[in-house]
Amino acid sequence: MISNPSSALEYCRKHRRRFLTELIEFVRFPTVSAQPRHAEDIKSCAAWLADHLRHIGLENVAIVPTPRHPIVYGASIRSSGRSSGLPSDRPTVLVYGHYDVQPPEPLREWRSPPFDPEVRSDDLFGRGASDDKGQLFVQLKAIESYLQTNNELPVNVQVVADGEEEIGSPNLQSFLERNASKLASDGAVISDMSIRGPCQPAITYATRGQLSLELTVRGPQQDLHSGSFGGAIHNPLQALAEILARLHDTDRRVAIPGFYDRVRMPSSAERLRLARAGPSDSQVLHNAREEFGWGEAGYSAFERITLRPALTINGLAGGYQGPGNKGVIPSVANAKLSFRLVPDQNPAEIERLFRRQLARIVPPTVRADVRTLSAAKPVVMNPQNDFIRAAALAYRKGFGADPVLIRSGGTIPVISTIREVLRAPVVLMGFGLPDDHMHAPNEKFHLPNFFRGIETAIWFLAAVAASSRWHGRRQENEATASALAV
């Protein structure tokens, strides 16, 4: 039975307008972690976020520097163990989110500037509105609603806000490892994914892994006149196109020997359940605003983006890109590649297989180099863990509907890190929608989901506190900013 958090719910309903105003201020920061010119913007946002954590009532707030972008931390720990030295008498929840965002380009496709948030109808438009500032804010506003009405939470909470998630969280694992005893939690909640619809919540129990690579093909030592050398010198752009064309076969499968060897085949029961819970092919195409689909034969569109691995080309560059024409053979061409991986594929092994295949297919007329940008393992979680059960109860209260269990085609690197370093179960409670245009122009966050999400997050903390089935560790050390290893 869930205790009734009536005062927190009343508070969040009363302050909806202010919550939206603060979210708009949060989204306004151009926190593009992949672009060095935004490093100062990220620092400014981290300072704003740290001040906000203090304002809502969290303690031990710290901005933790990393070699690139900072992590923001805050906690609310209330325990009889504080004075007795005994373990905490209530569960501890780690709330993870990220405040960095994807690059907004191409800017010409935005109806309003990406970092000048705009409310249109029931949606807030802006880069990061859904991924992940809006969804992180859902959790923060739930925490505030408790702290500003009851002066404490029904559970212990630690908040970790990452400034590098969109570039693979390269410094998060070392932060967690250095502070593992201080961050020890009974479980973690992450809100950084979509649900099925405005009235149909969903709990994600699996995510794909990722391997991001940059492939550079080099030809002549300098750009050459295409009239003087065209037809006699292999163009690196053409060579790159030829290489990329050989990475898929005629059946639209990845043409790298060994790529599918470790792919875990789903059971017929799981495929049937996902077919019932997930979107239809027509819905996937509608969300993509496309008429025709593409992909591996024998699988539905939803299966292709959740159960099956994929290789996508995220960017191509080389040669003259300005107005008009320039007759040139460029000296360099490059492509950005993204592998989405499923259990039991390992990013390190897939990279080795790719490099081996590349050595076979690169023509002798050019040279190829590969740089690893990021890597993350695929994750499958036990749908019966206590945090997922608590989330199901909370969705029922907040949305008035039972959630469905679904897989996600996306990647959240921190999931496997939390599970491996902190040994804590994770629940993925999303509040975005499939048509929120995450990573694309005109990203938005559906505001009814924002407000329902806050109420759901309030119920979630109450459900966790009421659970009598804790199998995890009790946190034996208080987390303090001064004790955090930086």
Image: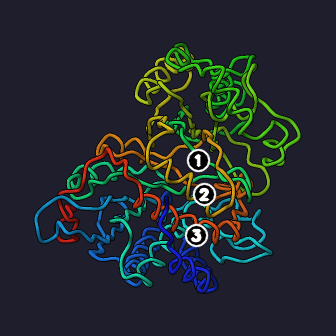
Tell me which label, 2 or 3, sits earlier in the chain: 2
Whether residue 213 is visible = no
Q: Amino acid at mark 3?
A: Glu
Q: Residue at x 11, y 67 (%)?
A: 84
Q: Amino acid at mark 1?
A: Ile
Calculate the distance from the C-alpha at mark 1 to the C-alpha at mark 3. 16 Å
Q: Which residue position holds label 3?
A: 455
Q: Amino acid at mark 2?
A: Tyr
Residue lying at the far front of the rendered structure? 1
Disc 1 secondary structure class: strand
* Pointer 3 local density, CA inside 10 Å: few below 14, some 14–19, many at least 20: many
Where, by quadrant of the figure, is residue 144 drawn? bottom left
Q: How is the image coloured?
A: rainbow
Q: Which residue position holds label 1?
A: 203
Numbered label tally: 3
Please say if the residues under marks 1 and 2 sit with CB atoms less than 8 Å apart: yes
For discs 1 and 2, the disc positioned in front in the rendered view: 2
Q: Nearer the viewer, residue 347 or 396?
A: 396
Residue 232 position in % (x across, y down): 67, 24
Residue 38 position in % (x across, y down): 48, 68
Q: Nearer the viewer, residue 369 or 320?
A: 369
The correct choice, above or below, for 242 with respect to 105 in the image is: above
Q: Residue at x 78, y 50 (%)?
A: 325
